[in-house]
Image (cartoon, rainbow, N blue to C red):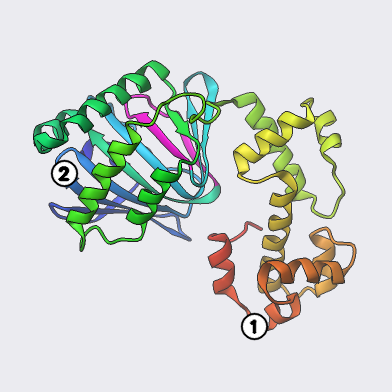
Amino acid sequence: MKEIYPEQMKMKYNDKYKSIFTMYDGKELSQMTFYHLFPGLDLIYNKFNTEISPTSSKDIERDYVEINYCKRGIFESTMPEDKLLFLGEGEISANINKIQRIEAVFTKGYYEGIELLISIEELEKNIPPMFSQIIDNIKELKTVLLNNNMGIILKPIKEMIHIFDELYYINPEENKLYAQIKVLELLLVFTTIPMNNENKKKRYIEKEQVDKIKKIHDELTSNLDKKITIEMLSKKYNMGTTPLKIYFKEIYGEPIYTYLKDYKIHRALHLLEETDKSISEIAGIVGYDNSSKFAKVFKDKMGCTPTEYKKQKVHLEHQRLFGVEIKQ
């Protein structure tokens, strides 16, 4: 399946069972690890620390079915006709590689997840006959995806998340048979789930609406020290308060004020680590009227006060919670 590997990534390791591709943007390392479980079926572990997703610009002749599970972050795909899909944490998507994404972005600047990449033609030739039902189910899924023409995103489904999480914490190289069994189980469960409105997430958001929400995001995060209400934003951007709140959560993974609360702590961590500003100055910059209230919110999130954090320089905790460095 080498024709689909992203051109922006460099091959670091390759053998008959495993391939590793890496991409370095000057600050952070991103990696895709492919395990070739069966001819025609790859299990891929994705870990990206960047905003722009690597994609392949090559013409793809075969219909590869992709199934993605998002563990951390948000995966934004621009599809034909200016439609955008958002894959959030715990959600599962299915797509056909021939349905080309115009652009793909990791909205939060990081992404971790698992992907199954399936060539039906090749897998059918190599999989044991006892699993022929899985092949038939995948073919039916392919038909659904071709008719949909936009891919499908499913709401979190308990049975599938359980299997994905089992795969997430094993080493397929050391447990190949187990990984093969779990992937076949996953495909059996996935392909028997009804692709109806009850299980499907909202299909897409118009690009015009996404652009407005991103402007709202930038306005809020650039003015942490100002009181900006949802009603003010609704009027300024000519968008109802309800769709504004729904779209923001869809794109950024959290309600507006929850997101802002975490963003303020994120920003404060950077200021504590990289500047000599006082606690009261930092409190004001991130929108708190007094340092006492800021200290309480900070301690609730981090488990220590801003003063203790500044002394201890707990950088590892910062990375564990947020995954990436904040932009200045």
At 57% across and 71% down in the image, what residue appears? 317
Would residue 285 appear left or right of 245 to someone viewing this image?
right
* Residue 43 vertical placement versus 40 (above, below): below
Foreground of the two, 94 or 260:
94
Residue 188 point in image, percent of width and height = 28, 37
Would residue 302 appear left or right of 106 to someone viewing this image?
right
Mark 1 or 2: in front is 2
First in sequence, mark 1 or 2: give its number. 2
* Numbered mark located on residue 38 in the image: 2
Mark 1 residue type: Gln
Res. 195 image quadrant: top left
Mark 2 residue type: Phe
* Residue 114 in sight: yes
Residue 205 point in image, percent of width and height = 59, 26
* Numbered mark located on residue 312 in the image: 1
Q: Which residues are magenta?
A: 91-107
Alpha-carbon distance for marks 1 and 2? 49 Å
* Numbered mark located on residue 166 in the image: none
Element marked by disc 2:
strand
